[in-house]
Image (cartoon, rainbow, N blue to C red):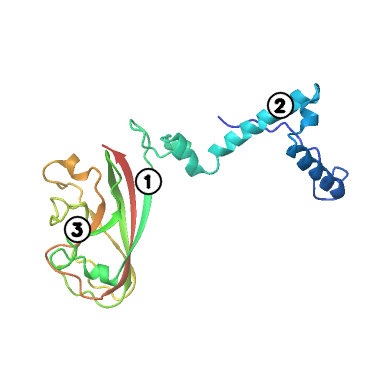
């Protein structure tokens, strides 16, 4: 439902040179009078049997406007107070059922030291978070992942893969078992800045054991393998672009 057209009109304008422009001096005088009357509770107007009811109704309209403004400061407040709304109405899309769940975007930059540390055997055992754990009863559904490589030197380790997985809590990622996206020989052969794509593990068993338990409220992470680390200091940085959804259990 949309708002109907505005029906009220201005008593005066404050700009331009038309006949409907209020005299600035008179406007200042009126503002002074309004302030003085307000300090006394507008007692003259309120005690008038004709104008008093009008003032009361104007006050009620003011209260209604204040209440409306409290809910429409910005779109975030609407979603926070009224949520969950269907995404067609600007909501989060997390009401359950058959709602449309929006595609979200995360941009994560990993510096040289962090990329050096991604090998599972010699560095980080848990990987680097690309999308935080979404909360109880929810899971991250990655749709597409690309990486902008800021080149520093040759990456010559041909067994240094890069994997995307739900947080394994230190478990070694393995293609065909618990890897969602896979970049084989990540960065090998490039001689300049470039974008690197990941292969989605279509047609593969994604997680052994309990699929639901493996994904619920788990962060999406980038993690290496036991095979090889990246050639030290070969990346100035890597910028991950992640398209994903947050879905209910």
Dividing the picture into quadrants, the one containing residue 121 is: bottom left
Task: Examine the rendered structure and indicate whether residue 97 appears above or below residue 70.
Answer: above
Q: Quadrant of residue 21?
A: top right
Q: Is residue 236 left or right of residue 165?
A: right
- Work out how far the residue at label 3 is from the one at label 1, CA to CA, in angstroms: 25 Å
Q: Is residue 41 above or below residue 106?
A: above
In terms of secondary structure, where does tag 3 sit?
loop
| 62 relative position to 142: left or right | right
Relative placement, left or right, of 86 versus 175 is right
Mark 1 and 2 residues: CB-CB less than 8 Å, in contact? no
Q: Which mark is residue 103?
A: 1
Residue at figure coordinates x 76%, y 33% from the top left: 42
- How crowded is the residue under tag 3: few (<14 C-alpha within 10 Å), some, or many (20+)? many
In the figure, residue 69 lies in which quadrant?
top right
**107 or 81, nearer to the observer:** 81
Mark 3 or 1 closer to N-term?
1
Label 3 and label 2: CA atoms lie apart by: 64 Å
Horizontal relation, residue 59 to residue 51: left or right:
left
- Disc 3 or disc 1, which is closer to the eye? 3
Q: Earlier in the sequence, mark 3 or mark 2?
A: 2
> 28 or 235, which is in the foreground?
28
Give the residue drawn at x 73%, y 34%: 41
Total numbered badges shown on the rendered structure: 3
Q: Which mark is residue 56?
A: 2
Camera-side mark, 3 or 2:
2
Please, which residue is most extreme toward the right here? 19
Q: Residues within 10 Å of mark 1 (few under 14, many from 20)?
A: few
**Residue 85 location, x and y as percent?**
43, 34
Residue beneath the point at 80% across and 47% down: 14
Task: List the residue tagged with mark 3.
Answer: 126
> What percent of the width, then of the height, locates residue 5?
67, 32
Estimate how packed mark 2 is, as few (under 14), some (14 to 19) or many (20 or more) residues with alpha carbons within 10 Å.
few
């Amino acid at each position: 439902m949309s708002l109907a057209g505005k029906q009220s009109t201005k008593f005066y304008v404050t700009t331009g040179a038309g006949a409907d422009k209020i005299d600035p001096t008179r406007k200042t005088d009126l503002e002074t009078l309004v302030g003085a009357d307000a300090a006394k509770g507008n007692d003259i107007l309120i005690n008038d049997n004709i104008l008093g009811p009008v003032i009361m109704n104007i006050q009620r309209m003011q209260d209604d406007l204040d209440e409306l403004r409290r809910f429409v400061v910005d779109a975030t407040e609407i979603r926070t107070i009224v949520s969950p709304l269907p995404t067609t109405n600007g909501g989060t899309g997390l009401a359950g059922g058959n709602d449309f769940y929006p595609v979200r975007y995360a941009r994560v930059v990993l510096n040289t030291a962090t990329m050096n540390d991604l090998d599972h055997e010699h560095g980080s055992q848990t990987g680097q978070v690309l999308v935080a754990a979404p909360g109880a009863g929810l899971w991250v559904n990655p749709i597409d992942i690309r990486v902008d490589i800021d080149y520093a030197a040759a990456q010559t380790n041909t067994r240094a893969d890069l994997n995307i997985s739900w947080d394994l809590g230190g478990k070694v990622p393995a293609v065909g078992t618990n890897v969602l996206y896979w970049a084989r020989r990540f960065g090998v052969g490039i001689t300049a800045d470039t974008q690197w794509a990941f292969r989605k593990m279509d047609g593969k068993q994604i997680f052994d054991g309990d699929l639901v338990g493996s994904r619920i409220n788990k962060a999406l992470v980038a993690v290496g393998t036991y095979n090889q680390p990246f050639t030290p200091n070969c990346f100035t940085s890597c910028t991950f672009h992640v398209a994903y959804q947050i879905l209910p259990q």
